[in-house]
Amino acid sequence: MKILIVGSGIAGLSLFHKLNHSQHEIDLIEKAPSARLQGAGICLPANAMAGFECLGFKDEILKHAHQVTEVRFEKASRKLLSKASLLEAPLNQQPFVALERDNLMQVLLKDIETNVQYNKFIIAMQHNDNTCVVSFNDNSQKEYDLVIAADGINSDTRNKVFDTPELLDLNVSNWRFCIDFPNHKMQPSYLLGENDLFMFYPISKDKLYCYGQISDPNGDIFKLDAKQAMKQVFSGYEQSVKNAIYNADTVIKGQLKSVKSREVFKHNVLLIGDALHGCPPSLQQGVGMALEDVLALSKLLADDNNTSEQVLSLFKEKRLARISWVIDESNKVIKLAELGKSFFGRILRNTIVRFTGPQNVKGWRKLMSDET
């Protein structure tokens, strides 16, 4: 088949690696003029590492990553609410690690960056019975059997082709950054405030990935300067949070959204990665789900008996229930965090966390047990 991969993020690069030496003819395009390496930290739960092991990248990633063994949920004062070990079954099937996103991208770009057609994007698509004629911004045109949209949660391809491309706005603003913290000896810690949350996640023994969020229905806080906003939002938190904000250099701010569409494919255009199941990072499943997409799709494409129509149908059949669970559960965790808006809501939320444990760990157990 002639296959077009749109987007050179984690999903697109991973799929290209998997298909590069197959019988298929693969084009990989990226609208940015060069590799997009700017980012903060990235957390890779066990199912993400299982995916990278299947792709052959696990050992290289571990050279750059930091393994964690416990997750803690705390109050804003840093008083412990609940904790869970990541060394117990089924979570111990793979290490839980984190690293700088730039390092992960460099691993994935190695040996294939010259294959990425940068500064190239789709202008129009003409859908025929079994193929799609794609027109590009460089005035070129080519016919493909499959177009794989791996162009992120704000997918331009989804907007062009699908019936429900809109995103669900979760009315939550967030900030991400990394700080140096020599010999911190920390495990991932999620601090719950009122309608806000702050996370410390180690990405090396001397560096922390920090993430903060707040319910922000009108976007008023999002409009503020990032540091000013964080100082305001987390003013009542324990001093370590205030120190982290003070030491923040490059801060990436955003607003949490979630994909509404469950179409998966239309004509011969298929969504994978965040274009298909982008959602809040409550379960940190962006990479894990993307790699599961890649492995499922590449297996279907390896079967010469499968037509493009069969590939699309079988992929949807295999993936839809699991990705829908991840999206719904990730959104649900956001709603649980927002219970803290009221005094009694905070009591209820904190009680749930005390008795049922860290909510992300609960989700990871189900994913690793394949109970979704």
Image (spheres, helix red, strand yellow):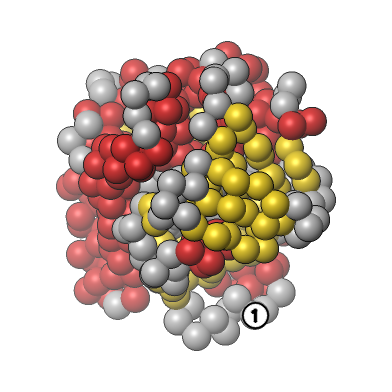
Q: Position of residue 85 (x, y in %)?
A: 33, 28
Name the residue located 43 percent from the left edge and 64 percent from the top edge: 162
Residue 280 sits in quarter? bottom left
Label 1 element class: loop
Q: Position of residue 262 (x, y in %)?
A: 32, 58
Q: In screen coordinates, is 50 left or right of 55?
A: left
Nearer to us in this view, 60 or 129:
129
Residue 61 sits in quarter? top right
Q: Is residue 101 visible?
A: no
Q: Amino acid at mark 1?
A: Lys
Q: How many marks?
A: 1
Q: In screen coordinates, is 199 left or right of 253?
A: left
Nearer to us in this view, 123 or 206:
123
Name the residue located 59 percent from the left edge and 53 percent from the top edge: 133
In the image, is residue 42 above or below residue 351? above
Nearer to us in this view, 326 or 149:
149
Which quarter of the rendered picture does the C terminus lie within? top left
Q: Residues within 10 Å of mark 1 (few under 14, many from 20)?
A: few
Name the residue located 24 percent from the left edge and 42 percent from the top edge: 317
Q: Is residue 6 visible?
A: yes
Q: Position of residue 265 (x, y in %)?
A: 38, 52
Residue 230 sits in quarter? bottom right
Q: In screen coordinates, is 332 left or right of 3?
A: left
In the image, is residue 163 above or below residue 119? below
Q: Position of residue 54 (x, y in %)?
A: 46, 18
In the image, is residue 270 above or below residue 233? above
Nearer to us in this view, 321 or 210:
321
Name the residue located 49 percent from the left edge and 47 percent from the top edge: 131
Q: Which residue is mark 1?
A: 223
